[in-house]
Image (cartoon, rainbow, N blue to C red):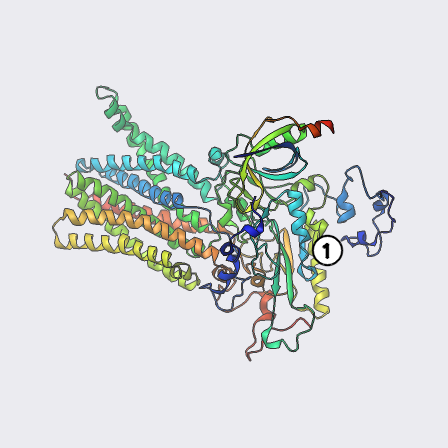
């Protein structure tokens, strides 16, 4: 066991150094030596990767259902691939979440109760039902592969077509519940704009789902389908852009913006996510649509950029939320009744610095 | 992995104090990878049986991180037996 | 060594709820220095309160009485067998503990309010030194409990909030949920930890360790309603004596009990802005944001699904 004297100097002084430079928040919000007033979520890449995977898989099933509803023969591959992407997402999602637990062997305790106030609990059961129904929807394809000469396929296909609808409902949940998961915390950046974050995650998920399906269609030489999915991706990306702008305005209003802008790594990730996930696809798909001619290269670029940008956006939002929790100037300003806009809570009133420049009133 | 043999005297949640054969007491935290669960520790404490704790140092804290608790590897030393 | 002490122990009468200078009659039953049994309902002697399941208990931490001795920190670590942290010097006054964590459930803050413009007429004693013993607030609508997907966090029969260590799987969702930065995940044992308001001691009729060890009664343990009454009287008293900046934090309608949190089972008397002590002035209940986020998300996704149906319904082939 090491003694206190063995602790390296840089670790010892961690608390002091940070105190001086805390960007963001209102200037008149004091802090306790700049020490974090909140604790950041103890999550890593597993969680932001999961948020992306869950959203993409859920949206792919939703889009697949739309293809099924259209009844079009040429969109059958979209339906089938939506099911497969949904299944792959479900298969990857659960291990990602379990690996993120700090006592993974007790993962099944998640199923002990259902709590409507906890998006983590809502999400557990959303993922569970999504996995179950999606499993039923991929059954025909799986059986066709495994038992080519088996004859009872008709019944299984009916089961799959019926299961498609609850799978889509759960898929809608998969695109959005992760926004509630982040918003229903005390980390200022996540808590500042719950509606906007919900819209962003949902729109980005649909864009990613459409992009993934378009990618598959393009690679299988079905450009017409890829073009149709590209249009959907364009609409979803535009919605994503609107919600991103709205959330930026909210962040500015609530004085939490510095959680993104003051940390170079987060700021870069955030900007890159917008350029790659929104700018590039909008440009590629826009050019492709306006020119009236389908370009395979533009379509592939747009799909890949949408997927990469979606993943990067989740990482940037996750990182920015953690920054905001670790920054007491931001978190204590955010938790002011007036949100740092001027009026102070009742207990604080006698201690506001006076107009004439004199400092606080003394006790006696 | 290091080992320490003694008797568990106090248990709180997943933390326990082991009084080693030399009389020194050490605080341990039960690792999530251990076969035992926090609720099993109370039984060991009440039985007052000697146990061997296999542990590593807990980073940043003055405690051991117990990865396993097994039946004692060695008997009490001669001086203790005499006492 | 074991000779009985004088029965008149003035320091015992510090306990709240007793008339000053007098002794609880039961004190006379235990005059030996070494008692070989657990005193039944010991809290009656030490805190003047009988601990019964079904009643609502809490802490009233009066920061104007805190002298920063850290007896509460030590008593808590000792009783709960919490390991010491090797953090070195913080540079934050006498506070090297820094904050609450998975292995620190009471934390004394030291705020040195040096008024640089008034150093000449500042009084020579440390009148501007604020100390506060921070702890889990055991909120009435506890956000950690509302966030817990396993049910490991639960409300006890004493109206306190406790993490059940045999259920917690270390998902960590309670950590960002807490608006006070109290709950912490222990990376070594992979479970969430926080103050239990000495759940085991309450079950045994003992006052929580921190409150019992507090030499100035800055930390008072008792039934919540009693504590609230006592706290209100204390504020009035302080105001009469000229300390008009004293106020309660965490009681209904006061800072700290905002945004749907209703009230904190462990509340405080503060004499400066909450932020000075590292406390949020107007924390909110995170579960209120589930519906807006999920609702907008579902509506957006559903609208885009409709857009997909519209797009796909075009020309049939």
Q: How many marks?
A: 1
C166 in relation to C180, above or below: above
The answer to whether one can see residue C26 in this image is yes
Which of the 4 quarters of the picture holds residue C32? top right
Residue C186 horizontal side relative to residue A208, left or right: right
Which of the 4 quarters of the picture holds residue A140? top left
Image quarter of the C terminus of chain A: bottom right
Check the image and name the residue furthest to the bottom: A356
Report the residue at 34% width, 48% height from top. Answer: A202
Q: Nearer the viewer, residue A145 or C56?
A: A145
Image quarter of the N terminus of chain A: top right
Q: Are there few (<14), some (14-19), or many (20+) residues within 10 Å of tag 1?
A: many
Q: Position of residue A187 (x, y in %)?
A: 47, 54
**Secondary structure at numbered mark 1:** loop
Residue C101 horizontal side relative to residue A50, left or right: right
Q: Nearer the viewer, residue B67 or A6?
A: A6
Q: Position of residue A248 (x, y in %)?
A: 37, 60
Label 1: which residue? C217
Q: Position of residue A83 (x, y in %)?
A: 28, 35
Q: Position of residue B69 (x, y in %)?
A: 57, 30
Which of the 4 quarters of the picture holds residue A56? top left
Q: Chain of mark 1?
A: C
The answer to whether one can see residue C53 in this image is no
Q: Nearer the viewer, residue C168 or C10?
A: C10
């Amino acid at each position: 066991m090491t003694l206190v004297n063995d602790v390296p100097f840089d670790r010892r002084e961690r608390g002091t150094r940070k105190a001086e430079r805390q960007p963001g928040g209102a200037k008149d919000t004091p802090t306790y030596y700049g020490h974090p007033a909140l604790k950041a979520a103890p999550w890593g890449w597993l969680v932001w990767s999961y948020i992306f995977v869950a959203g993409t898989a859920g949206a792919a099933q939703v889009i697949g259902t739309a293809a099924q509803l259209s009844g079009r023969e040429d969109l059958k591959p979209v339906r089938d691939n939506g099911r497969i992407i949904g299944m792959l997402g479900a298969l990857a999602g659960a291990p990602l979440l379990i690996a993120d637990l700090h006592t993974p062997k007790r993962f099944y305790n998640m199923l002990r109760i259902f709590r409507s106030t906890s998006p983590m609990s809502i999400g557990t059961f959303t993922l569970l039902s999504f996995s179950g129904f999606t499993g039923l929807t991929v059954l025909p394809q799986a059986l066709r592969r495994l038992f080519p000469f088996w004859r009872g396929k008709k019944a299984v296909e009916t089961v799959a077509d019926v299961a498609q609808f609850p799978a889509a409902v759960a898929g809608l949940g998969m695109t959005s519940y992760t926004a509630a998961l982040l918003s229903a915390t005390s980390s200022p950046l996540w808590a500042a704009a719950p509606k906007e974050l919900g819209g962003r995650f949902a729109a980005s998920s649909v864009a990613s789902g459409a992009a993934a399906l378009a990618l598959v269609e393009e690679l299988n030489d079905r450009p017409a389908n890829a073009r149709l999915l590209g249009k959907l991706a364009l609409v979803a990306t535009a919605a994503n852009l609107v919600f991103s702008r709205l959330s930026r305005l909210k962040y500015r209003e609530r004085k939490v913006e510095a959680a993104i802008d003051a940390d170079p790594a987060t700021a870069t990730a955030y900007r890159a996510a917008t350029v790659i996930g929104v700018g590039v696809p909008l440009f590629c798909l826009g050019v492709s649509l306006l020119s009236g001619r389908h370009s395979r290269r533009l379509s592939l670029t747009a799909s890949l950029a949408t997927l990469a940008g979606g993943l990067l956006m989740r990482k940037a939002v996750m990182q920015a939320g953690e920054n905001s929790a670790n920054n007491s100037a931001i978190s204590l300003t955010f938790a002011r009744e007036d949100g740092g806009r001027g009026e102070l809570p009742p207990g604080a009133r006698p201690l506001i610095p006076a107009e004439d420049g004199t400092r606080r009133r003394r006790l006696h | 992995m290091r080992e320490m043999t003694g008797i568990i005297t106090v248990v709180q949640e997943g933390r326990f104090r082991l009084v080693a054969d030399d009389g020194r007491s050490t605080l341990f935290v039960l690792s999530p990878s251990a076969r035992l669960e926090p609720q099993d520790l109370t039984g060991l404490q009440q039985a007052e049986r000697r146990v061997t704790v296999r542990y590593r140092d807990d980073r940043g804290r003055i405690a051991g991180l117990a990865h396993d608790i097994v039946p004692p590897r060695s008997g009490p030393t001669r001086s203790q037996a005499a006492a | 060594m074991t000779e009985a002490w004088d029965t008149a122990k003035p320091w015992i009468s510090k306990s709240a709820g007793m008339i000053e200078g007098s002794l609880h009659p039961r004190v006379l039953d235990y005059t030996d220095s070494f008692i070989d049994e657990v005193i039944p309902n010991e809290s009656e002697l030490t805190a003047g309160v009988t601990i019964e399941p079904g009643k609502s208990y809490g802490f009233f931490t009066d920061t104007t009485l805190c002298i920063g001795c850290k007896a509460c920190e030590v008593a808590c670590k000792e009783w709960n067998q919490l390991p010491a942290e090797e953090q070195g010097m913080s540079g934050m006054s006498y506070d090297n503990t820094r904050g609450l964590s998975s292995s620190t459930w009471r934390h004394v803050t030291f705020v040195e309010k040096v008024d640089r413009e008034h150093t000449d007429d500042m009084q020579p004693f440390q009148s501007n030194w604020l100390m506060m013993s921070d702890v889990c607030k055991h909120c009435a609508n506890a956000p950690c409990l509302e966030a817990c997907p396993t049910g490991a966090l639960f409300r006890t029969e004493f109206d306190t909030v406790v993490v059940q260590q045999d259920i917690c799987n270390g998902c960590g969702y309670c950590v960002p949920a807490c608006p006070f930065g109290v709950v912490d995940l222990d990376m070594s044992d992979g479970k969430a930890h926080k103050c239990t308001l000495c759940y085991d001691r309450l079950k045994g009729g003992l006052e929580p360790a921190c409150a019992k060890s507090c030499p100035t009664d800055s930390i008072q343990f008792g039934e919540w309603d009693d504590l609230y009454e006592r706290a209100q009287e204390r504020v009035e008293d302080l105001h009469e004596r000229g300390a008009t900046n004293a106020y309660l934090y965490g009681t209904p309608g006061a800072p700290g009990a905002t945004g749907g949190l209703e009230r904190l089972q462990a509340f405080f008397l503060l004499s400066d802005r909450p932020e000075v002590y590292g406390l949020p002035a107007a924390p909110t209940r995170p579960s209120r944001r589930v519906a807006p986020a999920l609702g907008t998300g579902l509506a957006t996704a559903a609208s885009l699904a409709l857009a997909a149906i519209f797009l796909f319904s075009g020309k049939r082939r």
